[in-house]
Amino acid sequence: MRKLKLITFDAFGTILQLAKPVPFVYYEMARKYGISVSLEQVKRNSDHAFQEMSKMHKKQGLNDGLNPREWWFKVIKNSFPCPIPNMMAEDLWNHYSTKSAYHIHPLFEGFLRRNAQEKGYVVGIISNTDDRIYSVFKSCGFADLINVYAFSYDIGCQKPEKGIFEYVRNKTGQLTGEYPAPKECLHFGDDLIKDVEAAKNVGWHGEFCNIHTNFPKIIHGLEHSLE
């Protein structure tokens, strides 16, 4: 494994997960603001709002002049059967920019710190989302231990498209002065098509990794390779 130079991870479902279901968080926030609504209403509306926005404005509105905050504000406001204050939408947006909204696998930070100490691999994150994940990692104190970030909204393409993988490989070359060959790159993710197959389609190694199942085994293997 030490022949590898670049290792990347998907975010959701691979190294982190939501601490609470989204509808429940929305419901709790509504109660905080004194808005009377049932959890079932919020769940039904939020599912529909997300699906409709994903169809109407793909890639979080990248090609339609929307930024992620505007895109999510529409989802949030359409998740309720009544108007909500802008400040409530703002609070929900900000909530998902902090570590309190997520469970991050405890082994991940340990690997990042050891990898940095041993000057091991270039480590990256490839995620079909916006840059709030960086804010989450920053609030955890290890954002700077990750060398390359590729968020679909910022890059303009998303997994399983080739471009997002090529972006990370090129960025690695710019950072280190040495561009890794595709066979020297490995991507871990919990989606067999968007992560594993997509990585292999660009000549990388791709391995299935799920926070609930084999994540500890993957991390222990990586740490062993640093010895």
Image: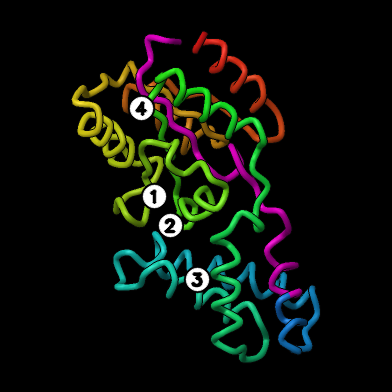
Between discs 4 and 1, the one toward the N terminus? 1
Residue under the point 65% across and 52% down: 102
Between discs 3 and 4, the one toward the N terminus? 3
What residue would you read off at disc 1? 151
Residue under the point 29% across and 54% down: 156
Q: Estimate the spatial distance between the alpha carbons at disc 2 and disc 3, rounded to whole Å.
A: 11 Å
| Closer to the camera in the image, 202 or 145 | 145
Between discs 3 and 1, the one toward the N terminus? 3
User: Magenta stretch containing residue 213, yes or no?
Assistant: no
Please provide the residue range marked out in magenta. 1-28
Given the image, on which type of amino acid does mark 1 rest? Phe
Q: Are marks 2 and 1 in contact (CB under 8 Å)?
A: yes
Question: Looking at the image, is 123 positioned above or below residue 185?
Answer: below
Residue under the point 75% across and 67% down: 24
SS class, disc 3: helix
SS class, disc 4: helix
Name the image quarter holding the N terminus. Answer: top left
What residue would you read off at disc 4? 201
Query: Residue 220's spot in the image, x, y percent?
Result: 62, 18
SS class, disc 2: loop
Between discs 4 and 2, the one toward the N terminus? 2
Position of residue 194 in the picture relative to residue 22 (left or right):
left
Given the image, on which type of amino acid does mark 3 rest? Trp
Residue under the point 66% across and 90% down: 82
What residue would you read off at disc 2? 130
| Closer to the camera in the image, 96 or 80 | 96
Q: Estimate the spatial distance between the alpha carbons at disc 4 and disc 2, rounded to whole Å.
A: 24 Å
What residue would you read off at disc 3? 72
Q: Estimate the spatial distance between the alpha carbons at disc 4 and disc 1, rounded to whole Å.
A: 19 Å
